[in-house]
Image (cartoon, rainbow, N blue to C red):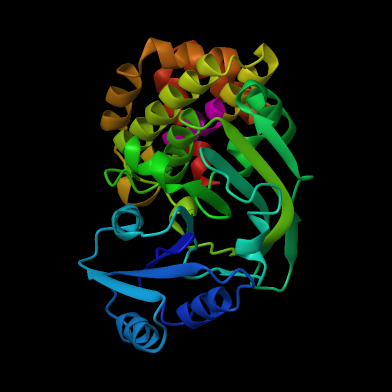
Amino acid sequence: MNPVVSVIVPIYQAEKFVKRCVGSILQQTHKDFEILLINDGSTDNSAFICNEYAEKYPNIRVFHQENAGPSAARNKGIDEAKGEFITFIDADDFVGDQFLESFFIINQSPKATLVQQGYIKDYTNGKQILLQFPSKRYSADRFSDLFRETHFIKTFPFPWAKLYDKDIIINNNIRFRDDIRYGEDLIFILEYIIHTNQIIIVEKSAYHYVNNENSLSSSYQDYNKEIQRFMYVKERVDNICEKYKFAEDVKKRQYEHMANYLTRVFSTLYTGKWKKNRKERLIIYRSFEIELIEFIKEYYRATNFPKRVFKLLLVSQLYITLDAFIQIRTKK
């Protein structure tokens, strides 16, 4: 008989954390689950540790593949999952013993549903931040209320701490995009929401997210990838707002958050390995679509003087001055 839940854990160079992660899953009060360990080409002892677990526990399966990134690892887990439902846990995170049980508190069989619980953000200095909302069930006609009350895109952009109906994922061919390495999580979640008829929030917060300052979410990628990611997200937010008839204030809040991200893409032109020279930057600015300039003009909330200057120069298309301004700000 197939398990109720498939727990998918993508693993890369995680020998320091994987035992804590897998050990916490094995302690679950909800016992009807399998663990899929997807070793994404690790060169440390991760593969050996995973194999040891698989030999010892019949509900653990291990898959080894060449390094292809977390999206490819999660997709492999989806393809191999036997459970009715799927949840993801990152190898450097861990969960409390009621993590799985909590998903079923409100609905014992949450088909065509996304179930979201809170989480605890753990810092290396011992500090913890708890994020949770009261337990509540939202039908499709109330998704607008959900996004208003929880700031969903900003608060829950991660694939973990969620329970997914595997049939929705398989039947709609929803997968993590492996052509981008930042923001693919949110794209997957938004695509899933388009095909759900209910979202459940449970107050329990049994997922421990270990803050890692060196993670992909704190780095930049190539400018074209950053823009591509934004357009992927915008397309899905547009679809959700239209399908579920979001109130205007809710729609505006989603776009304001996205506009803030859109301004981030310029930073990649000035820092890190994707840094461009002045000539290349000006070419990119001059090819920046008018539609996106208008988007920033309408939705970007410039909350301090540097941001107001940035917005004014970009909207006015004063790219030479804008380039000099950002370069000065970057060097500070």
Residue 232 shows up from this direction: yes
| Magenta span of residues | 258-266
Residue 129 lies in quadrant: bottom right
Question: How far across and how far down the image is residue 7, in percent?
Answer: 46, 63
Residue 94 lies in quadrant: bottom right
Residue 208 shows up from this direction: no
Question: How far across and how far down the image is residue 62, in percent?
Answer: 31, 74
**The N terminus lies in quadrant:** bottom left
Question: How far across and how far down the image is residue 254, in percent?
Answer: 60, 25
| Towards the viewer: 319 or 211 | 211
| Relative side of 198 to 41, left or right | right
Question: How far across and how far down the image is residue 56, in percent?
Answer: 40, 89
Please, which residue is most extreme toward the right here?
Answer: 134
Q: Would you say the magenta stretch is mainly helix, strand or loop? A: helix
Relative to 52, residue 285 above or below: above
Please, which residue is most extreme toward the left here?
Answer: 66
| Towards the viewer: 265 or 258 | 258
Q: Is residue 263 magenta?
A: yes
Please, which residue is most extreme toward the front here?
Answer: 1
Q: Is residue 297 magenta?
A: no
Residue at 49% over, 53% down: 218
Q: How many marks?
A: 0
| Towards the viewer: 55 or 131 | 55
Relative to 303, residue 22 above or below: below
Residue at 53% over, 55% down: 160
Relative to 179, residue 75 above or below: below
Residue at 75% over, 57% down: 130
